[in-house]
Amino acid sequence: MRQIPVDTSAATVMVAKTPQPKVKDRRTGEIAMDVESGAKLMTVDVMFAANDEVEILSITVPEPGISGELTMGTPVALTGLIARPWENDFNGQKRHGIAFRAVAVTSLAAAAANSKAA
């Protein structure tokens, strides 16, 4: 299994850094594009809190999947979050990690404001 679905139902997720274009090549400044849709890819850093642990995750999201005002501290929902292990050789050094990707990152601030008004 090269893609692992991530259950976010028991997690608290907030924006740690506003969405930024994902850079494919730092030397040229080329922006990464989604292979399937052709949409520009964005990176959103989020604080992911679950099971008494907190991590900062960088999530890649197609630009159309970013909705609502995503400022620092905004609670968000992550739709279709997956984790994908990766490994490569760079200048003779093996590197590895986990890449996170979501279909959408949606602000929950408007929903919270609407529920308080009711």
Image: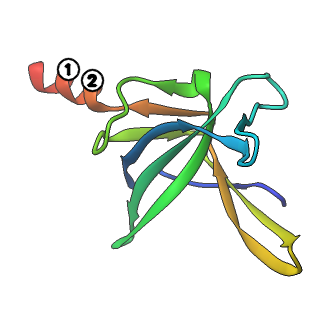
Q: How many marks?
A: 2
Residue at image mark 2 = 110
- 20 w.r.t. 95: above or below: above
Q: Residue at x 64, y 40 (%)?
A: 22
Residue drawn at point x = 79 percent, y = 22 percent: 38
Q: What residue appears at the point 52 percent right and 37 percent down from the top-left corner?
A: 20
**Residue, far bottom:** 93
Q: Dot 2: few (<14), some (14–19), or many (≥20) neighbours within 10 Å?
A: some
Say which quarter of the image contains residue 110: top left
Amino acid type at image mark 2: Ala
Please tell me whether mark 1 sits on a helix, a strand or a loop: helix
Q: Which residue does the numbered mark 1 point to in the structure image?
A: 114
Q: Nearer the viewer, residue 40 or 2?
A: 40
Q: Is residue 65 above or below residue 46?
A: above
Q: Helix, strand, or loop for circle 2?
A: helix
**Of 48 and 50, the residue lying toward us:** 48
Q: Position of residue 92 (x, y in %)?
A: 89, 80
Q: Amino acid at mark 1?
A: Asn
Q: Quadrant of the C terminus?
A: top left
Residue 105: x %, y % from top left: 50, 35
